[in-house]
Image: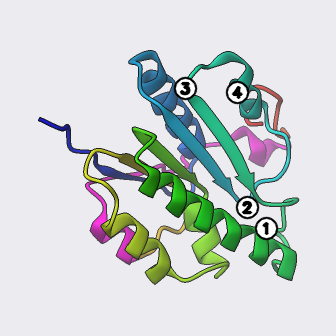
Amino acid sequence: MEEKGYIHVYTGNGKGKTTAALGLSLRAVCAGKKVFFGQFVKGMKYSEVKALEYLPNFEMEQFGLNCFIYNEPSTDDIEIAIQGLQKIKDVINSSKYDVVVLDEINIALYYKLFEVDEVLKILKNKPKHIEIICTGRFAKEEIIEIADLVTEMKEVKHYYNEGVMAREGIEC
């Protein structure tokens, strides 16, 4: 009997959403599963991009340029996000992977890089065995409703507020 795959959402203003998705990905790869990790909005070379060198059955692709979070997204930001969503749709429909991560998909939706209905259609039509992880702050209510598991990361205290910038291997 084929195992059912669930839809997870990791959201909230606290640190750890991408980290949790990476941890689940590591666990899945170590169990012999194939993982595709798609990063929306991100184009910078975060440390996790190096996972491709170390992990078998793990693929990662970024669907972002530079960080526009403090500005409005450009037409290039929108175009690469739309291309990324099509890639995710193809990856899911290929049934080649057991786990598919849509990292920062909630941020992409928040900035209206594409419509929530497009994402819902992909999620609703996924092959039954695929586990899907959606991360990012500001998860849309429609995404939360369709999810089987929702975790909200809540910031209680963060050293960033004391002027500590992102550190390689910890935050980036």
Q: What stretch is highlighted in magenta?
A: 141-163
**Nearer to us: label 4 or label 2:** 4
Q: Earlier in the sequence, mark 4 or mark 2?
A: 2
Residue 145 lies within the magenta run? yes
Q: Name the residue under label 2.
A: 41
**How far apart are the alpha carbons under marks 1 and 3?**
31 Å
**Nearer to us: label 4 or label 1:** 4
Q: Earlier in the sequence, mark 3 or mark 4?
A: 4
Going by the numbered disc 4, the residue's amino acid type is: Leu
| Farthest residue, direction left | 1
Crowding near the residue tagged with mark 2, few <14, some 14–19, many ≥20 C-alpha atoms within 10 Å? many
Q: Where is residue 117 in the image (x, y as percent from the top left)?
A: 44, 82
Q: Mark 3 points at which residue?
A: 57
- Tag 1 secondary structure: loop
Side (left or right) of 104 relative to 170: left
Q: Mark 4 points at which residue?
A: 52
Q: Earlier in the sequence, mark 3 or mark 2?
A: 2
Residue 62 lies within the magenta run? no
Q: Which of marks 4 and 1 is nearer the N terminus?
A: 4
- Tag 3 secondary structure: loop
- Tag 4 secondary structure: helix
**How far apart are the alpha carbons under marks 3 and 2?**
23 Å
Q: Position of residue 94 (x, y in %)?
A: 45, 51
Tag of residue 69: 1
Q: Residue at x 77, y 68 (%)?
A: 80
Q: Where is residue 106 in the image (x, y as percent from the top left)?
A: 55, 66
| Residue 74 visible in this rendered orientation of the protein | no
**Between 75 and 106, the one nearer to me in the picture:** 75
Side (left or right) of 62 relative to 55: right
Going by the numbered disc 2, the residue's amino acid type is: Val
Crowding near the residue tagged with mark 3, few <14, some 14–19, many ≥20 C-alpha atoms within 10 Å? some
